[in-house]
Amino acid sequence: MSTAATVATTLRQLSGVTPKTEFGGLAFFVGGTRFAALTPEAVLLHLPPEALTEALMGGAARPFISVGAMGKHGWVEIRFSSIGPDELSRYLLAAHNAALHGHRRTAMKKPGRARHTRKTTPK
């Protein structure tokens, strides 16, 4: 089994994970939040700040730059050839945990109709 297939199996087994095919590869979501994507040679992860700094400073990852949505802060590319399985597992769990807790954030609700004030015109 390839490393990408092993990582895909690991990610599918984590709680609340939904895999989806995107751009010819697999992306992994928790509650609508994408936290990982696979290529044949690497995994793309959205890491929390502490794990992001550790991965970049330790040389395990490089920033992932994309024109699309994943080009935003916190996304890194970790090549399978540059990291051991234990360290990779630690980063997979960090990304999953951040997505698991971060997906509960919701957009601000619009005020209800009762809170709207109407302008009155003088009679």
Image (cartoon, rainbow, N blue to C red):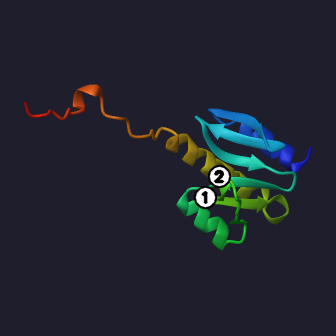
Name, please, the residue furthest toward the top: 114
Quadrant showing the C terminus: top left
Viewer-nearest residue: 77 or 86: 77
**Residue at the spot of label 1:** 72
Viewer-nearest residue: 120 or 110: 120
Q: Position of residue 64 (x, y in %)?
A: 70, 62
User: How far apart are the alpha carbons under marks 2 and 1?
Assistant: 6 Å
Residue at the image position 20 percent from the left and 32 percent from the top: 118
- Local SS, label 2: helix
**Residue at the spot of label 2:** 69
Circle 1 Cα neighbour tier, 10 Å, few/some/many (<14 / 14–19 / ≥20): some
Q: Position of residue 35 (x, y in %)?
A: 64, 47
Residue 44, disc: none
Viewer-nearest residue: 65 or 119: 119
- Local SS, label 1: loop
**Residue 90 visible to the viewer:** no
Task: From this view, report whether residue 43 is shown above or below residue 107.
Answer: below
Q: Position of residue 101 (x, y in %)?
A: 51, 42
Name, please, the residue furthest toward the front: 123
Label 2 with label 1: CB-CB less than 8 Å = yes
Quadrant showing the N terminus: top right
**Residue 2 visible to the viewer:** yes
Task: From this view, report whether residue 104 is shown above or below residue 87.
Answer: above
Task: From this view, report whether residue 72 is shown above or below residue 31.
Answer: below
The residue under label 2 is which amino acid type? Ala
Q: Position of residue 6 (x, y in %)?
A: 83, 44
Res 26 → quadrant: top right
Residue at the image position 70 percent from the left and 41 percent from the top: 28
The residue under label 1 is which amino acid type? Lys
Residue at the image position 62 percent from the left and 32 percent from the top: 16
Circle 2 Cα neighbour tier, 10 Å, few/some/many (<14 / 14–19 / ≥20): few
